[in-house]
Amino acid sequence: MDPTIKDVAKKANVSIATVSRILNDKPGFSVKTKTKVLRVIEELGYQPNAIARGLVSKRTHTIGVLMPTLLDMFAARILNGIDDYAHELGSSVIVCNTDNNGQRTLKYLRVLAEKRVDGIIFVSEYLKDEYYKVMSDMKVPIVLVSTMSPDYPVPFVKVDDELASFAATEYLLKQGHRRIAMIAGSPEDPIAGVPRIKGYRAALNAEGDEEAKELIVSTQDFSYESGMMAMEKIVDHPLKVTAVFASSDELAVGAMSYANKRGIRIPEDLSIIGYDNTRLAQMSTPPLTAVGQPLYEMGNKSAEMLFSMMNTGETAESCLMPYTIEERETVTRI
């Protein structure tokens, strides 16, 4: 039979109320008593019942994370950062794959409400009015990751996508490239599409060189398959580009794969830079130069902000994280 809180109290020679206060981080005990009780809990292998703890603390020690996909390395790194932080504080994470589907997102939000989660982290999607209404009704803290809301006062953790895109394009310009194509997200996507396109265009305009030509191929997502399709359009376009800026690593690797099928050598014939700096960038052949987002740290920071809000009731300050240019082997100077 699994040990109970009564067993812990008996072996530690304290009251059940004292064990409960220690488990729920309430005052009323000495450091010596806390150390003794925690040692007994470890010795017995006691696992506090989350529901019972929730009745006392009004918390379930679970948080909800909504993500548009769980399949790519971008999502995995952010989720790792969130889960590690939550685990250190003794909380569990309920992960919901929304698939960028509005009805599915609302369904998951209702599930999280039924589970009485203590807070929500919303990753890489636009915070629609209907989502915010449901979250507001839940009366729990919310943090956005790799997205932000112009409409609602919700704290966020992200990189400045416009500046990072500017830096990627500027990097190619400094290598001597002037005819630079961009494989972008949707021009209607206000989160990752519009800002990155604006940064790309701003860098070309800032160059002030008549030879600096733009070519934007929009995609509906940031997948490998979309990168292949976009690259076909670029290769067959009259503007013979010397470099490509892809707004995700998966798009970049898809573009490289298509280029290889057409006998185009990377970087001898065509330079490519990606965006995110996931492990895929390191594993590609050749290794992909990329704009680096600190994805794990972004996830970790969002969890830190969420737990701070849960504990203090105060809204956390939004956080812009630094980006980098990770130079590898897919960009050459001309």
Image: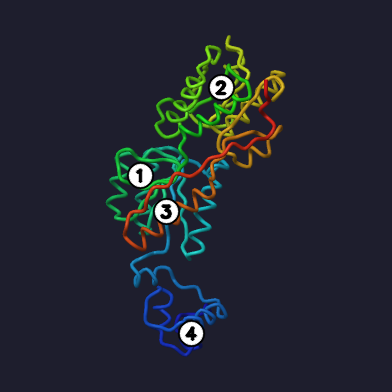
Q: Position of residue 89 (x, y in %)?
A: 48, 65
Q: For the residues marked 4 and 3, what is the alpha-carbon distance in whole angstroms?
A: 35 Å
Q: Position of residue 277 (x, y in %)?
A: 59, 39
Amino acid type for the residue under numbered disc 3: Gly
- Name the residue that disc number 3 marks: 64
Q: Position of residue 325 (x, y in %)?
A: 59, 36
- Name the residue that disc number 1 marks: 106
Residue at figure coordinates x 59%, y 21% from the top left: 231
Count every numbered label the image shows and give the total.
4
**Residue sticking out furthest to the top:** 238
In which quarter of the view is residue 6 placed? bottom left
Which mark lies nearer to you, 2 or 1?
2
Residue 217 visible at all = no
Which quadrant would the C terminus be assigned to in this image? top right
**In front of the other: 66 or 198:** 198
**In front of the other: 19 or 167:** 167
Amino acid type for the residue under numbered disc 1: Leu
Give the class, few, some or many, for how many residues have Cα within 10 Å of label 3's Cα (few <14, many ≥20). Answer: many
Q: For the residues marked 2 and 1, what is the alpha-carbon distance in whole angstroms?
A: 32 Å
Q: For the residues marked 4 and 2, what is the alpha-carbon distance in whole angstroms?
A: 64 Å
Would you say 322 lies left or right of 50 here?
A: right
**In front of the other: 66 or 2:** 66
- Name the residue that disc number 4 marks: 32
- Name the residue that disc number 2 marks: 230
Disc 3 to disc 2: CB gap under 8 Å: no
Residue 256 visible at all = yes
